[in-house]
Amino acid sequence: MNKDIFEGKIKEISGELRKKWGELTDDEIQRTKGNTEALQGLVQQKVGLSKDEAKRQVDDVMGRFEDSGDTLSDKLNRGIDKAKDKLSH
């Protein structure tokens, strides 16, 4: 995740991370400064997950905050396309 995005959304991100992993503190999250590897290590240590599982879960949570540059229309069209694919199979 881009450091600027992390800093701009720190409260929202911190809330989501603490909701998923209550063992984490706001200070610990802020010390990672958006570095996903540092956050993965923190989650691995505090929650007791394997390295691979911590990476997968952190990537999943942080991915929700990435700005892909897509417009709402792009996202809706992708959703419609996925629904059409499911119905046609």
Image (cartoon, rainbow, N blue to C red):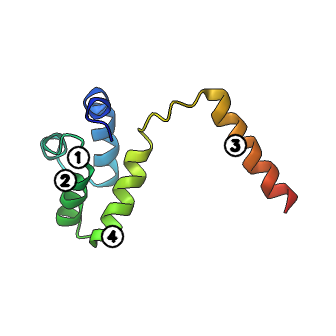
Q: Residues within 10 Å of mark 3 (few under 14, many from 20)?
A: few
**The disc labelled 4 sits on which kind of residue?**
Asp
- Give the residue number, with chain letter if any, for mark 3: 79
Above or below 21: residue 6: above
Sequence-first disc among 2 and 3: 2
Asked if the residues shown at circle 1 and circle 4 are in contact, with their CB atoms under 8 angstroms apart, the answer is no
User: Residue 52, percent across and down?
Assistant: 33, 70
Q: Amino acid at mark 2?
A: Ala
Task: Check if mark 2's residue and mark 3's residue have beta carbons within 8 Å.
Answer: no
Q: Secondary structure at mark 3?
A: helix
Q: Quarter-wise, where is residue 4 in the image?
A: top left
Which amino acid is tagged 1? Answer: Asn
What residue lies at 18% left-to-right and 40% top-to-bottom? 33
Q: Dot 4, crowdedness within 10 Å: few (<14), some or many (≥20)?
A: few
Q: Which residue is mark 1?
A: 35
Counting from the top left corner in percent of width and height, residue 76 is at 68, 35
* Residue 45, position as x, y percentages in the image: 17, 65
Identify residue for label 2: 38
Mark 1: which secondary structure? loop
- Residue holding disc 4: 52
